[in-house]
Amino acid sequence: MNFLKKALDFTYNYYIATPKIFSLLKIMDMKKVLTFKTLLVLTLSIVVASCSKKSGSDKNSSRATGWKINSKDGGFQYNTKFKEQETAPGLVFIEGGTFTMGRVQDDVMHDWNNTPNQQHVQSFYMDETEVTNKMYLEYLDWLKRIYPPDNPNFREIYHGALPDTLVWRNRLGYNEVMTNNYLRHPGYGEYPVVGVSWIQATEFATWRTDRVNELYLEQNGYLKRDARLTDATAEANFSTETYINAPAETYGGNEDVLSGGKRKTQTNAAGEEINKYARRESGIVSPYYRLPTEVEWEYAALGLSELRNYNTYRGRKKYPWDGQYTRSGKRTKRGDQLANFKQGKGDYGGIAGWSDDGADITGEVKSFEPNDNGLYDMAGNVAEWVADVYRPIVDDEYNDFNYYRGNVYTKNAIGEDGKVTVVRVDSIVYDTLPNGRIVAVNLPGEVQQVAVDEAETYLRTNFSTSDNRNYRDGDKRSSRQFEGFNDEDEYGENTGSSKMYNAPRHKVDADTLGNMVRQYDKSDKRTSLINDEVRVYKGGSWKDRAYWLDPAQRRYFPQNMATDYIGFRCAMSRVGSKSKGKKKARK
């Protein structure tokens, strides 16, 4: 560096700072001008090269081996320029933190299932609005194009994803306009989708993950442009999990798609192509869209940042907005309702000519102000599915970090050839739900999943089984039982009614001719409506009174059923830093 400094000083003093510079320029011939330019360029080039080498030495060479990273000749490849996770379409960043979960203001239902407990939530992303009819129709359109329902092999794929539009019907009410129009008419395009079960919501999230990552890979030159529109078929389409684990089988192994991107081909010293596929190390593949957990949803809905004072919260909130009332106190909107909910018996919107909340059923998203996290309709409009299996208690004594009940751990199925098993058109698995609806468990192009076994659980301390829905919940391992009930039901099966959670078990079977036989559980020995297939939903809806607008309130509903007042929104985990950018020092 001393040499460089002297060279710069010489260049500056001799050619620029000398008082005789102007006279020198007048008498300088072309040879001297060229010498000056050459020396100046050479000096600057040495400086730039030296600085670049120094700044890149830590990232582009391994501190473990000293070997070069991202060498054009091959070797270890890693995205050393990655700065921060890109915010995926539709999402808003929620910085994680600590808060008190389950702090309800009232308990008029006397449920006693909201014991306040302190939880820490990692940073994550959440949909700005509920998933709308237009968003869900895009999903249905894709399914219809890729898996035509007129093909008997695919009929149940499309039909299994259709929302139940009959949820609008009422025995003593005329709601056929919603039954026929709510899902598809443009007048309801920006309204939240309803009639969607928890199972359908999770399938939508999986589909959304694949479509977003498919676009990212196309934009970065890994896939042929517009292949998602021109080349995708039932036998050949994109799955994120397949691309990560068996990229050569993506799009059915179509080389025109996999090698048709705009990326410049890289080869090693032997002339072999390298870095053909993006891996997790590339930072291009996005984490999965999913349903938010209950603790994430409640934390995001409260938007506690306005109450933050140094490292504590000054007070608490009853609603996603500040204050104890459902009407606005701001001068410009004084008296206006702050959410879409039922204000009283027969009062779903207000008097004609001046509606209290602007809606009688659901309302268009973004009709009200967002909370402090930038999220709309976290109270009212529709209640929302969350990921958790319902239990009356939250076991904060065991875990107070990213609490979630519902883990069922799976792994990729491995074939006899040692490779992951990709689902083919002839290996689609369907499941018949207790309500008789048929849904596809997997789709062609996806990696088949199986439960984790002893190879993953042996001698572990953090988990011991694949299915952890019942862990520490007073159910399967509980000593709290109802004595005197241990009989068999009408199907000859043990009812298990001595257990704490003993919900009705309805069955749907097929006879020898393939006709569906529905078997309704008529047992009078049941002790609960709770089982492993009921999920939590949060937030009030257009059909609920203000009591349910409190984000801490929690209710449950069977995961395979749908209503006209439950919708959903997606979330995504944050990878890397807890916050965006660097923390600014307080003055």
Image: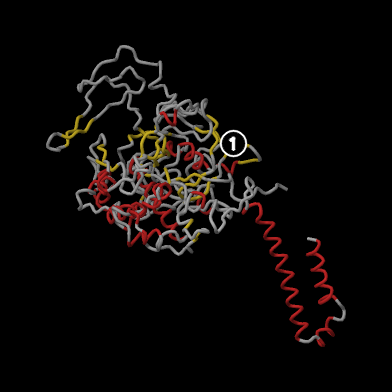
User: Image point 46% across, 58% down: which residue?
Assistant: 273
Return the x and y of residue 242 as percentages of the image width and height: 39, 48
Q: Which residue is mark 1?
A: 315
User: Image point 62% across, 47% down: which residue?
Assistant: 65
Q: Nearer the viewer, residue 214 or 166?
A: 214
Above or below residue 262? Residue 338 is: above
Count neighbours of disc 1 (C-alpha within 10 A) and say few if under 14, some if 14 to 19, many if 20 or more.
few
Left or right: 180 as drawn, with respect to 381: left
Query: According to the image, what is the colour scheme of the structure?
Result: secondary structure
* Residue 110 seen in this snapshot: no
Return the x and y of residue 505 as percentages of the image width and height: 26, 27
User: How many marks can you see?
Assistant: 1
Above or below residue 462? Residue 146 is: below
Return the x and y of residue 1 as percentages of the image width and height: 78, 60
* Residue 445 seen in this snapshot: yes
Above or below residue 416? Residue 210 is: below
Residue type for callout 1: Gly
Q: Nearer the viewer, residue 83 or 470?
A: 83
Q: Residue furthest right?
A: 19
Return the x and y of residue 491 as percentages of the image width and height: 20, 23
Q: Residue furthest front?
A: 270
Q: Nearer the viewer, residue 2 or 521?
A: 2
Q: Residue furthest left?
A: 513
As helix, strand or loop, the secondary structure at mark 1 comes to loop
Q: Nearer the viewer, residue 283 or 394?
A: 283
Left or right: 233 as drawn, with respect to 19: left
Left or right: 22 as drawn, with respect to 362: right
* Residue 134: quadrant of the picture: bottom left
Q: Residue furthest top?
A: 484
User: Image point 55% across, 53% down: which residue?
Assistant: 79
